[in-house]
Amino acid sequence: MFLEITKKRNYKLIDISLKLHQQGIIDPNTYVLDLDTIKENASMLNKEAERLGMELFFMTKQIGRNPAVANAIVEAGIKKAVAVDPWEAITLSKAGIQIGHVGHLVQIPKNMIRTILKLNPDYITVFSYENAKNISDIANEMGKSQKIFLRIAEENDYIYYGQEGGFTLSRLFEDIKKLEALKAVEIAGLTSFPCLLIKENKPSVTPNVASMQKANEFLKEKGYEHLELNMPSATSTETMRLLKEHGATQGEPGHALTGTTPLHTEDFLKERPAMTYVSEVSHVSNKKAYVFGGGFYPRSHMKCALVGSSSTQLKKVPVLQNEPGHIDYYGTLDTDCVHIGDTAIFAFRTQVFVTHAKIAVIQGLSSSPKLIGIYDSVGNLLSDGQTIDNE
């Protein structure tokens, strides 16, 4: 999906990915992250948010909750993270990252609430009164108060399969008095997901935004002023103004940090591509080549790969999408004109935390490349860094 734009805007990343594999420094099934470009992307995102008066929380699930990258993003100006689930919050907190938002998209299991509250997140999203009560009860025991977001999910809102849940407007109207009676939580804002969709390379808001606005008006009538309107999905320098125009006070960039939102197939966006996926040709069968898997993603929209053993011999070959029910042993190339052991380089949308891939973080790509470290898909350091022979 992003192969051509990566060739055009960050070819050195492709080149170093090839060398890392051919030199045996990384295994197949490894994502390579360009730390400097991610940091530049984060800085541009932060500056645009400051210009618009918005707050940003950065998302790391797409890059495997990586602590080295997370800290670089903080250095670039986005100070706090959003955790997709409580385990991500714990991992990031151990790396010294402040948690701005947790509980959205995954609620906090009851017996983990105390652990999460100890991390002092700014906001926790709740899908129901019962979730809010569980948080309030434990926060009260701990002698603290927790700010919460209410997730709005009206019946006709756009919700991805498997991500259902939240307050319909009618449920909010019924539950508001019970929510207000809770001792140790404070309703601080509203959220939903997705608030933006990209269709034919154009961003547009979903019906979820209108539902949030209706909920906000209802709460204003109840005396709530200056509620946060947290509107995640496809947050980038290109889309933030649209979010702001619809009342957003917060955005949550994830794919924009690596230049991999659907909009980033075009070269007019500020953020540059900063991620490749590296595999190796395993074998050829029935006029198709098979590369080692483990890091492929069903919604990747990949089309092609670059295959070869040297930068002067890389050739573009078509990729066959794996079927939804496949086990991720291999990816498939629609060619038999490759050699076993060749490097295969991909660039596509991914969610590293749901794979068993590795992450290689590279710094100094434009001058003296250095491998910062190799990590697993959920942020654990597997091996320390080293200088790379870039000849």
Image (cartoon, helix red, strand yellow):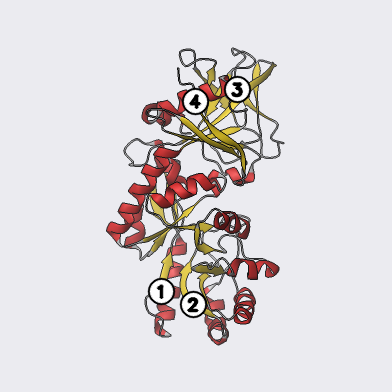
Q: Secondary structure at mark 3?
A: loop
- Can residue 237 be seen here? The reply is no
Is tag 1's residue or tag 4's residue first in the polypeptide sequence? 1
Q: Mark 2 vs mark 1: which is more N-terminal?
A: 2
Q: Amino acid at mark 1?
A: Leu
Which percent across, then down, holds residue 356? 66, 40
Element marked by disc 2: strand
**Left or right: residue 47 compared with residue 116:** left
- Mark 3 and mark 1: span between their CA atoms? 52 Å
The image shows residue 195, relative to residue 212, as above or below, that is above
In this view, the mark in front (2 or 4): 4
* Contact, mark 1 vs mark 4 (Cβ under 8 Å): no
Q: Which corner quadrant of the image does residue 337 belong to?
A: top right
Label 2 to label 4: alpha-carbon separation: 51 Å
Instruction: Name the amino acid type tagged 3.
Output: Gly
Closer to the chain start, of discs 4 and 3, is 3
Residue where numbered disc 4 is placed: 388
Q: Label 4 amino acid?
A: Ile
Label 4 to label 3: alpha-carbon separation: 11 Å
- Which amino acid type is shown beneath numbered disc 2? Ile
As drawn, which residue projects farthest toward the left?
A: 51
Residue ID at (46%, 33%)? 2
